[in-house]
Image (spheres, coloured by chain):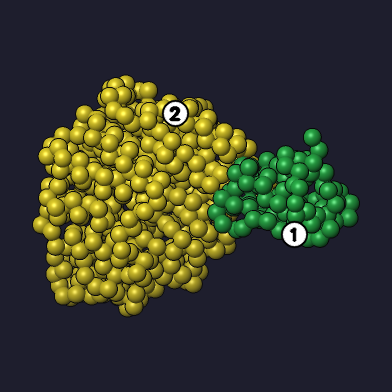
Amino acid sequence: MQILKAAMAGTLESSDVQVTLEPHEGENQVEVQSSVLAQYGRQIKDCVNDTLSSLDVNGVKVTVVDKGALECTIKARVQCAAYRAAGVESGYPWGGAIK
Amino acid sequence: MKNAVNRDIPQQVLDMGYEPFQGSNYKEAHQYKKAAPTVRMRPKQQDTKLLGSIREALKAVNFRDGMTVSFHHHFREGDYVVNLVMKEIVDMGFKDITIAASSLGQAHDPVAQYIEQGIVTGIQTSGIRGKMGEVVSHGKLKTPAILRSHGGRVRAIESGEVHIDVAFVGAPTSDCMGNARGKGGKSDCGVLGYAVVDSRYADNVVVITDCLVDFPNFPPSIEAVDVDYVVVVDEIGNPKKIASSAARYSTDPRDLLMAEYCAKVIEHTPYFKDGFSFQTGAGGPSLAANRFLEPLLVKHGIKMGWIIGGISRPAVDLLNKGLVECIIDTQDFDIAGIESVHSHPRHYEMSTSQYANPGNKSAFVNKLDYVILAALEVDVNFNVNVITGSDGVLRGAPGGHPDTAAGARCCIIVTPLVRGRMATICEEVVTITTPGENVDVLVTDYGIAVNPKRPDLLEALQKTNLPLRTIEELQQEAYAMVGTPDPLPFKERIVAIMEARDGTVLDVVRQIDPQGAAGE
């Protein structure tokens, strides 16, 4: 998926996560702030990277501000931010672009 | 060395003279000689003990480097006394100070700076939160903080394990000789039970008030016979934060579900009979349990004998409706509690020793039937943590939790299965503050687990339609939802010692490693 512009998904409510995606030179870069960083920081980062891979998204900087979101929420917010950043408004590749 | 709750107690702690925890009743019938304060006699005629300022009081008690000062926490997050006194001690250039408080909170954030400056080198408390919790968790305090339950603190003072040089007792009212009460004035906090042991065992006792009343201020909580000096200041606290005006009735459906489960557990266990005794913590679901219990009392024609602990409106309502014979009060959380202790003839005040001290000849908690308590975490061995957050930082207070859990015939812990992404029911709690052997029933929004050591309670509850689960099932369900947490990144350095009620070591808290928590 081609990232065209910066885009955001999610809120800063408790149990949500705000994900911002921006075009970025080189490899994907993921920055995580989280209220549960010590216990789940690694897993949040893995979840973001896995979701980006499943959508075949490269060359992005991702800023994650997590308020204790569950993994399903993180995945959904990353997907949504990616579609918005890629200008995809229909025909979503549900389940990931790479099968 | 591994203790009885399977925590490794480092040699460094044993070298300080500590024994590892060996079970809640290890010290049963243990004999000891109580410590005693050094007292300055006053046989002469005396008009007043009033001094002009805290500074004058520090001079009068011959304050020196290395001293231990004590405070109570009846003013809760509205307290000004700790900061007023510590600022004066620091301004006068003293150092190497130990604070031995019944509890400390965010109101005492300025003390964090004195810890970082190396002026405050020891902390002994029940609660530690806010900036102080942060700096201690990051290893800035010179010696490990010592964390005790309310009862454990009284025991440690009476046995001489902690010796208080100067006790500063904030008092809503006092006369010029130091008869002090929780009643009256502009900072009315109801009772002063936490400070009683300080007044009797500290070498020097200074009462600090913002409302001087005529002699004698009777009946006093703190007696003039124990008081050296009285200082009047403008404000000892913020009344709005001392007592909240509105009872905090939870409307969260999850809280109410758990509260209803708690009430039903009580209804169907054998101690639910006329005259039973009861305590709840101040958490949302714990307090809400009172509401669900009330119709059950009426339905079965049962009246409680007594309620103890921190008191707020739900307990007062039961008293006024004639559903409990009396309240014996250690602390007041709201205006309803304060007004009741001042006006109701069967709402009494007691000292913390009488409430919870395992070192006396029987505290009230020893006769408690039910207690409902909250938790930050509970592990599969029913061990409870109420002191460290999921980030490993000190942000809580054992308070009366370990005391009431140990004493009560049926200790009910109520907590949601998960809080956000934090699994409340986990494989291993960060810090053990209450040993699992004292926990009988765990109530969560996803089901109720009975400690296998209580087959009698399990059998009783199996006759109900309550959703019974094993604690392992609850823990696995929590992890399935939020994922298995990574271990916290701790360094070697011990920043706090969690004492069991009897003074043995339940657990230690280690310095948190902020680099390790970067999610790498």
Q: CA distance from mark 1 to mark 2?
A: 43 Å
Q: Which chain is green?
A: A
Q: Mark 1 near mark 2, Cβ–Cβ under 8 Å?
A: no
Residue B343 picture quarter: bottom left
**Relative depth, front residue between A98 and B77:** A98
Q: At label 1, which amino acid type do we have?
A: Ala
For chain B, the rendered hue is yellow
**Numbered disc 1: secondary structure:** strand
Counting from the top left corner in percent of width and height, residue B370 is at 26, 38
The picture places residue A83, in percent across and down from the top left corner, at 76, 52
x and y percentages locating residue B198 in the rendered image: 30, 55
Disc 2 target residue? B471
- The answer, for residue B27, to whether it is visible in the render is yes
* Nearest to the observer: residue B440 or residue B323: B323
Crowd class of label 1 (few under 14; some 14 to 19; many from 20; radius 10 Å) = many
Q: Which subunit holds the residue at mark 1? A: A
Q: In the image, B316: left or right of B157?
A: left
Which residue shows up at 36% across the image and 60% down it?
Answer: B76
Report which residue position mark 1 lands on: A7
Quarter-of-image position of residue B61: bottom left
What type is the residue that disc 2 sits on? Ile
**Height in image: B181 above or below B152?**
below
> Is B520 placed above or below A64 here?
above
Residue at 57%, 33% (x, y): give it.
Answer: B480
Where is residue B250 shown, x and y percent of the image? 36, 53
Task: State the residue in front, B25 or A17.
Answer: A17
- Residue B123 seen anywhere in this rendered image of the structure: no
